[in-house]
Image (spheres, grey):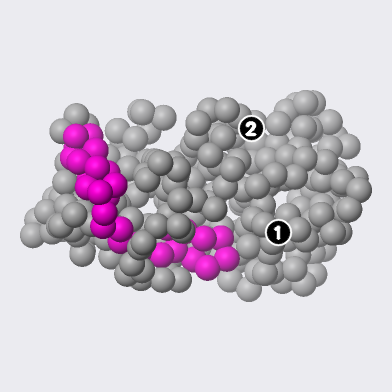
Amino acid sequence: MSCIEQMKYEILLERISFKESRDYIEKNSDEVYYVPPGYKIFKDYYIIGIPPIAVGAKGNALIFPYTKPCHGSFVLSIENEDSIKEINRLREMGKEKTTTPLKKDKPLESSRASLTSYQDMWKKDI
Amino acid sequence: MTGAKVLLMMGCPEVPIQTSIALYLSHKLTKLGFDVTVAGTSAATKLLKVSDSDGYYAKKLVDLDKTLEDIIEKRTDFDMCFAFMHNDSGMTYAATVSAISQAEMYSIVFGRNAEALAETIEFDCEKIVAQDVHNPSRLKNKLDKVMEEMVK
């Protein structure tokens, strides 16, 4: 059991496909960052997912996908001191790499272009 | 390929043929000289433990999430991975392993929606697809052919 299940979280969507979780995060976050599968958050949760994995920030809440083998994918939101740290870490990474946040008022085309460049970056890193 | 490390990755055990195929594949690959590890959810591994209580067919049985963590942290890796999937979550787990591991991927896609699920796979892999739920024969026959190719 990861630490996520022992934290106070809000379920924003449940029992959906992974792609639906990505779409929701992209459309309902103030900032969106893309991380590789296995990206670690909250000390011991390694994100399971199909790249590119969208992780969002909405205020101080971190919005992320959570996949369970028997129950599908969920979109969870956690807002606490640790979520602020995680969002700041994503912002720092965004400065260094191509994980530039996508503001939700950006047109869809620019969002798609960023996803492609992220995939290229991700393949090189691995 | 003798001694090559093979991971059998079981997902949700809701569809019956997963357990029998996992035991079959583990045993056949072990007999062919592969170093086989079977990873699964808590329920999937319990089904295997009861079916194979002396660990005759599945010699190394491990927790799925812990195995992924070990691959991510570079404590272990595999040469080949057979990923069982009958739902989107299984495919998502397999996509994750494809991204974090050097393993050559084989996707075992089964269940009522096998064909549609197989079409959603975007990572490089060999797909072994059978639209079966209870009868493992067709999937077994397809896997026999894959194993024949592996040892050529």
Q: Are marks 1 and 2 in contact (CB under 8 Å)?
A: no
Work out how far the residue at label 1 is from the one at label 2, CA to CA, in angstroms: 20 Å
**Quarter of the image with the C terminus of chain A in it:** top left
| Residue A78, magenta (yes or no) | yes
Question: Which mark lies nearer to you, 1 or 2?
Answer: 1
The residue under label 2 is B78
**Image location of residue B12, percent across then percent down:** 63, 62
**Image location of residue B21, percent across then percent down:** 78, 56
Badge 1 crowding class, 10 Å Cα cut-off, few under 14, some 14 to 19, many 20 or more, is many
Question: In the figure, B7 relative to B4: above or below?
Answer: below
Badge number at residue A77: none
Question: In the figure, A102 relative to A126: above or below?
Answer: below
Which residue is rendered at x = 26% and y = 57% of the image? A79
| Helix, strand or loop status at disc 2 | loop
- Tell me the quarter of the picture where residue A105 sits: bottom left
What's the residue type where badge 2 is placed? Phe
Res. B144 in view: no
Residue B55 located left or right of residue B102: right
Which residue is rendered at x = 29% and y = 47% of the image? A82
Residue B3 located left or right of residue B14: right
Q: Chain of mark 1?
A: B
The residue under label 1 is B44
| Helix, strand or loop status at disc 1 | helix
| Residue A52, magenta (yes or no) | no
**Image location of residue B144, percent across then percent down:** 81, 48
What's the residue type where badge 1 is placed? Ala
Compare residues B93 and B137 and report the one nearer the observer.
B93
Q: Are marks 1 and 2 on the same chain?
A: yes
Which residue is rendered at x = 77% and y = 26% of the image? B3
Q: Which residues fall within the magenta stretch?
A: A66-94
Q: Earlier in the sequence, mark 1 or mark 2?
A: 1
Which residue is rendered at x = 21% and y = 63% of the image? A27
